[in-house]
Amino acid sequence: MLSKYKYHLLLHFIIFLWGFTGILGKLIHLEALYIVWYRVGIASLVIMLYLLFVKSSLRIDAKYLWRLSFVGLVVAAHWVTFYTSIQWSTASLGILCLSTTTLHVAWLEPLIMKKRFSWLEFSLGLLVVGGIYFVSGDFSTQEYWAVFMGLVSAFLAGFFAVSNARFVEDIPSTHISMYELAMGFLGLTVYLAFTNQLDLSMFQMTMSDVFWLLFLAIICTSFAFLVTIDIVKRLGAFTVSLSINLEPVYTIILAIFILKEHEQLGPNFYIGSVLIILVVIANGIIKNQQKKRTMRSLH
């Protein structure tokens, strides 16, 4: 019985790990920039070592290098804004804003992938905006800035997701990830150096911080990514993308038990959360139905 659903269980374990990344923004006592610097640096190194271990060439066509470099900077900026949003408010709010990523993809795909614009997806996006407005009813000024940073993070996530959908046609996923993470690390290093933030203070941390940083970079990033590649091959991209919409649910549940965030958040937050999550899941189901109709029409 379990063997039949092995990859489904593994998928939800990976989503659980991704849900935990938001919690780590509170558990690691470092600034968002430093958290991301460690995350992309360690994760890119681990993936490179994996590729060397399986004797895979690290080379890619030079014409893709500058594009991967740019998207790598976007990935780094996405995580910096994500963790900033969490540190300015709560893990629940940060991940809730991030759950709008798939709806940013809806309008970015026509621009980048030259796909047809969907008014239905645009309407669903407006419902999400309504949910965010409902959630933010009693927020302070800092929490409004946290929402802004969270939505910027979601936009950046949508941008690199659509960009990677184009890259994956020509470059192995492992290589895309390694180069983007490495370029993100290089970009952050240059930024920290120019802003005089690359100093010994970023290496002063507790053993707890060291453990959670390694867990974030190795398990939640490198391991999760490599395993997801195999899961997508087994279950299909749609099943994976639809299931990933449960990430905010896992984060909010974890935040209640680990961070006691239910003491900070009122009923409006959870009502708005349910609305946003339902809209995002509905978007995935509608896309599935449209895909099935398209396939039937082709036959």
Image (tube, rainbow, N blue to C red):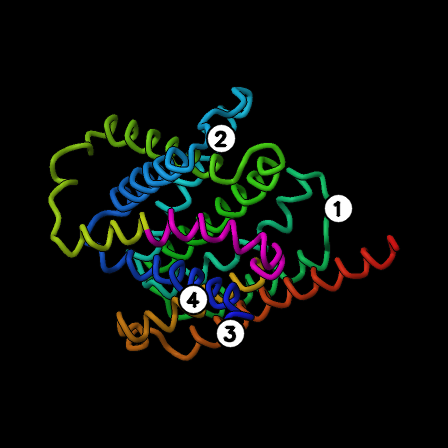
Q: Secondary structure at mark 4?
A: loop
Q: Is residue 193 above or below residue 35?
A: above
Foreground: disc 2 or disc 4: 2
Give, as a three-letter code, the residue at label 1: Arg
Q: Which residue is mark 4?
A: 136
Give, as a three-letter code, the residue at label 4: Ser
Residue at 18 percent across and 53 percent down: it is 209
Q: Which residue is mark 1?
A: 116
Q: Is residue 8 left or right of residue 94?
A: right
Disc 3/disc 2 C-alpha distance (Å): 35 Å
Q: Is residue 201 left or right of residue 184?
A: left
Badge 3 local density, few (<14 within 10 Å), some, or many (20+)?
A: some
Q: First in sequence, mark 4 or 3: give its number.
A: 4
Q: First in sequence, mark 4 or 1: give its number.
A: 1
Asked whether the residues under the numbered discs 3 and 2 touch, taking CB atoms below 8 Å apart as contact, a structural biologist would say no
Foreground: disc 4 or disc 1: 1
Q: Which residues are magenta?
A: 219-240
* Disc marking residue 274: 3
Give, as a three-letter code, the residue at label 3: Val
Q: First in sequence, mark 3 or 2: give its number.
A: 2
Question: Whole-percent x and y of residue 234?
Answer: 58, 57
Q: Which residue is mark 2?
A: 68
Disc 4/disc 3 C-alpha distance (Å): 14 Å
